Structure formats: structure tokens, C-alpha cells
Amino acid sequence: MDIVSILNLGQNSLELGLISALTVLALFLSYSMLNVCDLSTDGCFTLGAAVGAVVAISGHPYLSLGAAMLAGVVSGFVTALLQTKMGVDSLLAGIIVNTALYSINIAVMKNSSLLNMNKTETVFTKLASLLEGSPLGKFSRLIIALAAVALVVLFLSLFLRTKLGLAIRATGNNPDMVRSSSINPAFTTIVGLCVANAFTGLSGCLLAQSQKSVNIDIGTGMVTIALASLLIGGAFFPKGKVPVKAIGVVFGAIIFRVVYAIALRFHMPASMLKLVSSVIVIIAISGPYLKSKYPLLVRRIQHRFNKEVQE
């Protein structure tokens, strides 16, 4: 593989990593801050992609970003409403919404499982036309993805320092304490999931416009990918303030995409990539536990070895 191929591979991995980082940041807010495991991520990602594609095809590429985020807000609101007002367990609420979104996404895509956007103006083609002839022309996708991630990281850094943001973080840590402080944890949960799913919808929209197509399975496995990226980022940046942790999960998303790209370069079948995602999640979750048990394991081995020597 020559240097040009390596550079192209790195650029593609960086672009996809930044786009998926928006979903990872959504999970960072819902899972890490709010302590809610939202399993509607797959369906919400597809919803953002479908809504964004339909609006872009109608001739409004910039409006598609806002529409996708609004669709994500609605998805997050329904998920939060089920668990806060209707007594549905958070995991089950996410599964229910994710299942329902499959039918809704098909309806949004006009009863089709695929939308082609080859002749559609997108935010990427708009910027590419604007930068045509300049050295930055071929980096239009990277520029938009980087700008979106930077804005979301900045928003989270500022939002989680506000009174409402601190209340959301406190809800994730100790909802009983929040309730005793005259703060409604149901309200903070609803706001947190709405904001998080808005980022997921934006991520789906950008991916759809980047690859110029949407299929009904575009979001399949995104919750696993996002969780793996979140855990990888947490391993590299375990401590620090919100901006540091947010940047860490972005790096986690990029690293995950690089691993994906390397797996593809080794001619791994596409059907095995979900297995790769699962293995990465297992390693990321069990790694700290196994690391803590390693000294005890070494001592046991040494004890057995010394015992056999004495005998």
C-alpha cells in the first residue's frame, strides 16, 4: 500500500470518526452524565439520516441539519417520556422506541428501504463548490465534520456548567438528592435525552449526506460503536473536566474508525465487522477489571510455582 493510499485511508477514517463522534458525544451525555443507557440510538440515527435526506432532496441542504436534530429531539422526548411518566424501564423504553422507529423510518423514506442522493445538493457539495480550486477543496467533508464536532463539544462544555446542566449531572449521580433539592429528575432526564438524541440525529444526517445515500440499516450497530468509542476515549482520558472528557470520546471514535479501516484493509469480510465491534467493547469494558486482577493472578502463579519447587 503506497503513501497516497495510506493518506486517503487516514482521511476517510478521520471523517467517519468525526461524524460518528457526534453519536458518541450523545452517549457521553446520556450514559456518562445522565446514567441512562439509551438503546434507541440505532433507530434515532437512522431517523436523522432519513429526515435529513428527505429535506435535502427537496432542495434544502442546510435546513436538513436542523430537521434531523429536531427529529432526534422528538425521539429522545418519547424515550424519556416512557421511562419518566409511564413507568417503563429505561432499557425497555429504548428498545420499544428503537423498534417503533423502524416503521417510522420506512414511512419517512416513502416506503422505500433506500434513498439515493447522487444528484442532491448537500452541505458537503455546497462547501466543495465554494472551495473549488483552493487547496482546501478536497477537505470539505473533513472541515464540516470537524466544525460540527467542535461546536457540539463547545456546547456541552458550556451547557453542563449551567444550572440545568449541573442538575442533569446531579441526576445521573444521585436522583434522590436532586429530588430533595426541589429539582424534578423527570424534567432533567427529558432534557438530557432530547439534547443527546439531537446530536445522534445530526450524526445520521451528516453521514447520509457524506455517503450520498440512506438505507434502512444505516444505523444498525451504532449504539455498540458509540459505546466502544466512549470506553476507548475514557481509557485515554479517564480524568479531567467535561471538555477534556468530551475531546477524549472524540479521539475514541477516531481510533475506533481507524481499527475498522485496518480490519477492512486486511480483507476481513464485512459481515465480521460487527463481531469486531463487540470484541472492542468487551476489551474496553473488561480491560480495567482484568488489569486490577492481574497482580493477584501473578501472586497466585508465583505461589504455586514456589510450592512446586519446594515439593
Image (cartoon, grey):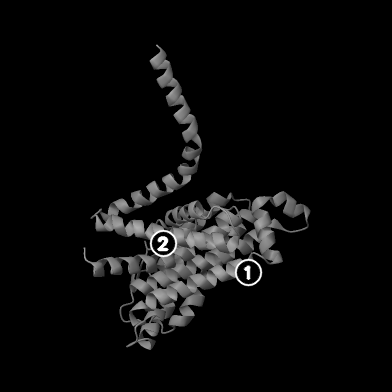
* Quarter of the C terminus within the rendering: top left
Residue lying at 55% horizontally and 63% vertically, measured from the top left? 196
Q: Is residue 291 above or below residue 24?
A: above
The image shows residue 57 at horizontal and vertical percentages of 39, 80
Return the disc, 1 or 2, that comes first in the chain's sequence. Answer: 1
Residue lying at 49% horizontally and 33% vertically, measured from the top left? 295
* Quarter of the N terminus within the rendering: bottom left
Q: Nearer the viewer, residue 97 or 2?
A: 2
Q: CA distance from mark 1 to mark 2?
A: 23 Å
Residue lying at 34% horizontally and 83% vertically, measured from the top left? 135
Q: Nearer the viewer, residue 301 or 121?
A: 301
Q: Nearer the viewer, residue 218 or 158?
A: 158
Q: Nearer the viewer, residue 105 or 26?
A: 26
Mark linked to residue 254: 2
Q: Are marks 1 and 2 in contact (CB under 8 Å)?
A: no
* Residue 71 appears in the rendering: yes
- Residue annotated with mark 1: 158
Mark linked to residue 137: none
The image shows residue 169 at horizontal and vertical percentages of 65, 57
Helix, strand or loop at disc 2?
helix
The image shows residue 111 at horizontal and vertical percentages of 37, 69
Amino acid type of the residue tagged 2 in the rendering: Ile
* Residue 108 appears in the rendering: no
Amino acid type of the residue tagged 1 in the rendering: Leu
- Check disc 1: other Cα within 10 Å, few if <14, some if 14-19, many if 20+: few
